[in-house]
Amino acid sequence: MTALLRIENYHLDIPTFDGVLRVLDGIDLTVERGETLGIVGESGCGKTVLVRSILGIGPKRARRTKGSMTFDSMSLDDLSEAEWRKIRGVKISMIFQDPMTYLNPLFTIGRQLSDVIAAHGRAQGRRPLTREERDQRCRQLLEQVQIRDPERVEASYPHQLSGGMRQRILIAMALAGEPKLLIADEPTTALDVTIQAQILDLMRDLVDRLGLTVIMISHDVGAIAAIAQRVAVMYAGVVVEQGPTHEILASPQHPYTQGLLAALPDIEGEIHPLEAIPGTIPNLIHPPSGCRFHPRCSRATEICKREKPEMRSIGADHAVACHHAAD
Amino acid sequence: MSTEPSITLPETPSFRERHASTIRQWRLYAHLFSTSFSSMLGLALVVLFLILAVFGPWLAPYPEDTMGAVKLSQRLLPPSLEHPFGTDEMGADILSRVIVGARTSLWIGLIITGLGAGIGVPLGLIAGYRGGFIRAAIMRVTDLFLSVPGLALALAIVAALGPGITNCIIALALVWWPGYVRLVESKTLSVKEELYVESALALGATTPWILWRHILPNCMTPIIVKASMDMGMAILSAASLGFIGLGAKPPLPEWGAMISVARSYMPDWWWYSVFPGLAIFLTVLGFNLLGDGLRDVLDPRSRSR
Amino acid sequence: MPSPATMPLTEHSGAQDAILCASGLSKIFHSGGKEFLAVDNVSLTIGVGEVLGIVGESGSGKSTVARMVMRLIEPTSGRIVFEGEDLTAKSGEELRRMRRHMQIVFQNPHSALDPRHTIRSALAEPFLIQTKVRGVELERRIDNLLDIVSLPKAFKYRYPHELSGGQKQRICIARAVALEPRLLVLDEPTSALDVSVQAQIITFLQELRQKLNLTYLFISHNLAVIRHICDHVMVMNQGKVVEQGSTRAVFASPQSDYTRQLIDSVPKLPKAKGGKIPGNVRPES
């Protein structure tokens, strides 16, 4: 069974006034059908640009210089707008961080949902749905995201609803076209922690019921750990480690992953001093030579400055891009 | 903090280093500006206008004609090599008068815009920041002024004060300031909610400090854009008043006044009104394009990256 | 169950005096004819040299309480006593002078610095407003501040947008400690920062407190951070205090359902060292 999404050796550059930003430097990722992949990284690591490129909504000036992306055996590179319209929302869908800014404040939820359903119907080349069919689908979608009073919600405007409710609606909209792949870009970051837990539960439930494949990106390791089976850790445009979530959390191999996890304060257990990773994220116009993490790494040696480390397998499905991983 | 007196002065890096950020920012602006043809055209026109305004008397081929000479033998000559713009009914060289008219127009534009902003900006800052009764009072008066068509109001004022270039300028400045109040008041309303203003308040800053140091600098962008566009409009308005005889009076070489006289010589002696008219047109166009260009460059939101 | 408002304040170790004591703070916001009770009868006491945390979700009123304590927002009712003096009774010049002794660090370092001013100008501001320090002495103080927050002198001539989030927050902290305050209110100081930067800033804040003898009022929605840095904690929900006590006690055995719900909602991770806590992670087969 081929992987649903395959990203191979993906390089992305963004030209700016000060120079060319080497935003993505050889990304290799695969997502199998039905699995949930988490991508963890901090600002500037490129995770947002990466997932937006999957949908073709990355920065306008961005140029793919090497590598490719394939979805369901179909190439995602250099597609026309017409071809993208058949994919966005219909095959691959996305939900974003701040639900308020992604909902039109002037229209009711019912109207917005209805518009989305109709648009996807057109994109799939189906005959236009009748009003009743659209309403029915609306209701179905809202129930799918565990909204218990769909009539009230359909008649409401976005500002009348809570943050958690809005995020559910965004998820409903994303699922309207029955996509195979759902990309979630920091879906819980803007939410309160109790609501966050509810949304993560909902997403887990949807994955089980609908057999969705999900890519979730976040800088919140905890949220990723709650729903992702596999996780990829990104730093400065490179995937530094990937593997099963519990394994990466229990025994991280890459110095950055280790540093990241050591910097997290605990909600339980002993209170230990937080270990901070020294230094700051690198300038992507002139990235560090060799391994991009070497200026901040306590284990860096000569080879780290010279050669970019390859992704090496160190266990079942667990791979690390580090010269000193096996140490 | 350190209690022992430090003997060494803090070392000061070179001018270049200290202002590296600013220099880089300006280079970025210049680059962005230069990518737009219309902006560069606007800049070229304005620069030409400024050169004429500053160096007018030395550039004019017949400087003695500028304040009205009487050379009746040369009256109303069509454009030729000796008189590229022709001559007027007194025999004066129109090219020279147009060139020197630039200086008059610049003067007028600067004073009107300067006075307008000078009155309007402080009022706008205070109205936006204080709120409450003061804001209501200022904004209602502003609304009053804005509800009367500008030129009509200027006409009324000039009629009351009497014709002449000074009164024309005063009248137009009084018409101009409300626009700045509106602009600055709305920008102030949003800037005062910014976290850095709250931060200054937490440090114990007084209102004048906040207005001068935080609000005004962040309002400068729209003010500059408006001011550059206003220059063109102010010159046009002054010319309009001159045209109907309520502004500059002959023999002052003001473009509007020149067209006013040229009216009666149309269409046979067309050059008399065409060239001053062209001067007004190009000057106003230049300032408008420049203002547009500045706005595109300075306001990051209107820029499509 | 006694209402939280009448719950006795936890005893602080008797030797410490309270640097700040607020009682009965309430705030009603008026908007469009409607009234909204943001803070309902909140009282708190902060002992000298300790870190009091206020934790809650959005809308709990915790930021409003922080701003009321600083009198950036006027309390509708209540009394604030700072170092023995009634802060609520002060106004005008007196209030401005009191501000030297208590400062605030905001959540969003990206908007807490005026984009039109250089870092040097931002650091000079506290001195220019509150003192007569000028010239060479001013430059020295600015350099000193940069040392305290471990940033290079070259940053003086940069603009905020050229700095990273963590660096900007350090500058904000430098501005806050410039006048040698005794109380520092921190309103979600790390919420807008990356995890590793957060760790840097938290560690730095802990060191700074020792070095400069500061007292902190720390606001956050992040329970793990609160647990890490605070001696005492107050849990707020919808304007009311739901629970308060020493951090250890509250986290180990929360009394209130809400607190328990908050703690349970935080996704838990198996730790690399020892791994004693079973995670919430479901390893899918």
Image (cartoon, coloured by chain):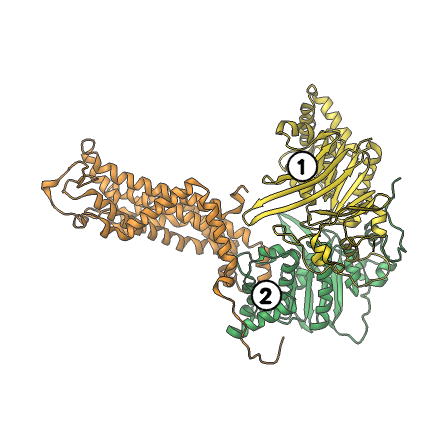
Residue A50 location, x and y as percent? 69, 41
Residue B126 location, x and y as percent? 48, 56
The chain identifier of the residue carrying mark 1 reads: A
The color chain B is rendered in: orange
Tell me if mark 1 has few (under 14), some (14-19) or many (20+) residues whose alpha carbon lies within 10 angstroms of its own. some
Quadrant in the picture for residue A273: bottom right
Q: Secondary structure at mark 2?
A: loop
- Chain for colour green: C
- Chain for colour yellow: A
Q: Secondary structure at mark 1?
A: loop
Horizontal side of B231 relative to A242 (left or right) equals: left
Residue C43 location, x and y as percent? 74, 63
The chain identifier of the residue carrying mark 2 reads: B
Residue B69 location, x and y as percent? 14, 47
The residue closer to the viewer here, C140 or C262, is C140
Residue at numbered disc 1: A157
